[in-house]
Amino acid sequence: MEHLPQLMQAVCPDSKIAKEIKCSSTKTHDIIDHIIGKESFNNLCEDLGQTKFSLITDESTDLSTTKHLCLVVRYAKMNRIKDCFLALIPLEEANAPTLFEHIVIFFRSNNIPYKDNLIGFASDGANVMMGRNNSVVTLLQNEIPNIFILKCACHSLHLCASYACAQLPRFIEDLVRDIYNYFSSSPKRVAEFKNFQIFCNLKVHKLLHPSPTRWLSVHAAVKRILEQLSLCS
């Protein structure tokens, strides 16, 4: 946005308005936060007050150890399906009653008749969200008996893959982690590995770390190792 005034002045050199345009990062932030953002939010709440919609949620903790509940809505408008970010709500606790209470308070404070217009709910398979007893789903079903519930297919697939991998010898995953750690802890080894790839006329690829919080990351890490091993065969 800081380049916009210069662009407008170059395109419209005779315009007095263009010459007076100023838009620094601070001003841009205020415009987006206090004008564009608020107007878009109000329009979205107005849409949700007049049409049926589904709610997609996820709970996470940021680097400052603050818990947040993310709300995304999906609805149809003018024969088009729209997915819109709705809110990011800070939390002190992440149990089912607290999550449900924050969702209800948000809808009520923004005049969104969720009991009439909320027809679907989707989330990951965490027990606090999808459990059979005292979860966000059961609390929603108490107020909206016919609500459609959809568990995240990616999360379910990840759980299936994790349970399947648990049947494999542990040393396989340990080997993948050890190979990654061997290179990542040494800039010299990383540089030598990069030079080896360049020598073989290959695209430079980094070894991947199998993260427990990243879906199906073990597969990608193993695939990358096998890719590099093929060079030595």
Image: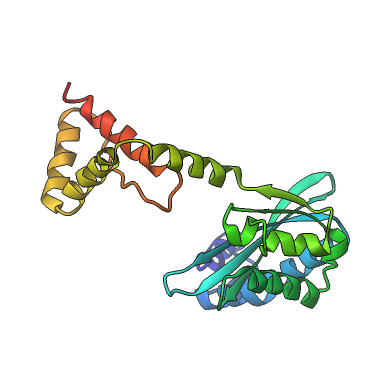
Quick one: which residue is furthest to the front in this view? 133
Residue found at the very far top of the displayed protein: 233
The residue closer to the viewer here, 51 or 95, is 95
Quarter of the image where one finds residue 23: bottom right
Relative horizontal placement of residue 79, taking residue 32 as reference (left or right): right
Residue at 58% from the left image edge and 75% from the top image edge: 90
Where residue 154 sits in the image (x, y, percent)? 55, 43
The relative height of residue 167 versus residue 155 in the rendered view (above or below) is: above
On-image quarter of the N terminus:
bottom right
Residue 173 in the figure: left or right of residue 56: left
Q: Is residue 16 visible?
A: no
Is 152 situated above or below 114? above
The quadrant in which the C terminus is found is top left
Tell me the residue at 78%/77% (across/down): 109
Q: Position of residue 70 (x, y in %)?
A: 61, 64
| Side (left or right) of 61 relative to 58 | left
Q: Nearer the viewer, residue 179 or 77?
A: 179
Camera-side residue of 39 and 64: 64
**Where residue 176 sits in the image (x, y, percent)?**
26, 41
Q: Residue at x 27, y 37 (%)?
A: 172
- Res 14 quadrant in image: bottom right
Task: Measuring from the top left, give residue 212's x and y in whole percent.
Answer: 39, 51
Report the label total: 0
Can residue 198 be seen here? The reply is yes
State the scheme by which the image is colored. rainbow
Identified at 67% across, 72% down, the residue is 97
Instruction: Give the quadrant of residue 43.
Output: bottom right
